[in-house]
Image (tube, rainbow, N blue to C red):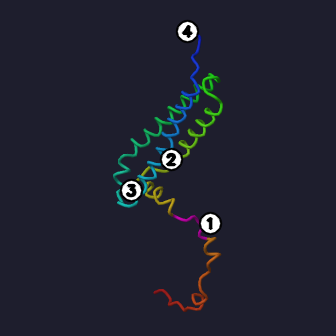
Amino acid sequence: MTATEQVQPSATVSRDLLAFFEKLVHGKIEEWEKLRRQILQNGDSDALHDCRSKIEAGFKYELGILGDCLTRAERQPDILPADIQARMTSLRDQLATHYNSLFPKWQTVEDLEDILLAPLTPSNEQLKAYAAKHPPPQSWYEEEWEEAP
């Protein structure tokens, strides 16, 4: 084989590569959810905040690996089957979305706590919809309130 010839990965290698990235991305997101629940239970957001730079570096490293593979696949279109390349692009986008949901917002411990609580906090729209379905009892409107001092 000459230096200009390219070895094309087999379908098995391509599928193994996809399986690796699926495990990487889904594992990263699942691990974050476990960590989020753990911190909410034990209340140690300071310890997690102390690891912020390492966690962000891990995300960036994994995004970089996925990005490098996709860049190579774009430059050499026959290196990966189109369906696998599309799935890897989707995985990169999922990981990037998760990264973007954390790190631009997470600068302080308070930011982290807001991020950790966000999935448990109903939105204004949800609260309004609930209030529309469940109005307060009439007696609340009839109560007399004391004036504040």
- Is 124 part of what is drawn in magenta? yes
Q: Which residue is mark 1?
A: 125
Residue flagged by tag 4: what amino acid is it? Ala
Secondary structure found at label 3: helix
Q: What separation in Å lies between label 1 and label 4 (alpha carbons)?
A: 61 Å
Percent position (x, y) of residue 120? Answer: 50, 63
Q: What separation in Å lies between label 3 and label 2 (alpha carbons)?
A: 22 Å
Q: Of 130 and 105, which appears nearest the observer?
A: 130
From the image, state whether disc 4 or disc 2 is nearer to you.
Answer: 4
Seen in the picture, residue 33 relative to 28 is either above or below; the reply is below
Q: What separation in Å lies between label 3 and label 4 (alpha carbons)?
A: 52 Å
Residue flagged by tag 3: what amino acid is it? Gln
Q: What separation in Å lies between label 1 and label 2 (alpha carbons)?
A: 24 Å
Residue at point 47%, 44% (across, down): 27
Q: Are marks 3 and 1 in contact (CB under 8 Å)?
A: no
Q: Which residue is mark 2?
A: 104
Q: Are marks 3 and 4 in contact (CB under 8 Å)?
A: no
Labels 3 and 1: the sequence-earlier one: 3
Magenta stretch: give its range.
121-127
Percent position (x, y) of residue 135? Answer: 62, 80
Q: Which residue is mark 4?
A: 3
Residue flagged by tag 2: what amino acid is it? Pro
**Quadrant where the N terminus lies?**
top right
- Is 23 part of what is drawn in magenta? no
From the image, state whether disc 1 or disc 4 is nearer to you.
Answer: 4
Seen in the picture, residue 124 relative to 53 is either above or below; the reply is below
Labels 1 and 4: the sequence-earlier one: 4
From the image, state whether disc 3 or disc 1 is nearer to you.
Answer: 3
Q: Are marks 1 and 2 in contact (CB under 8 Å)?
A: no
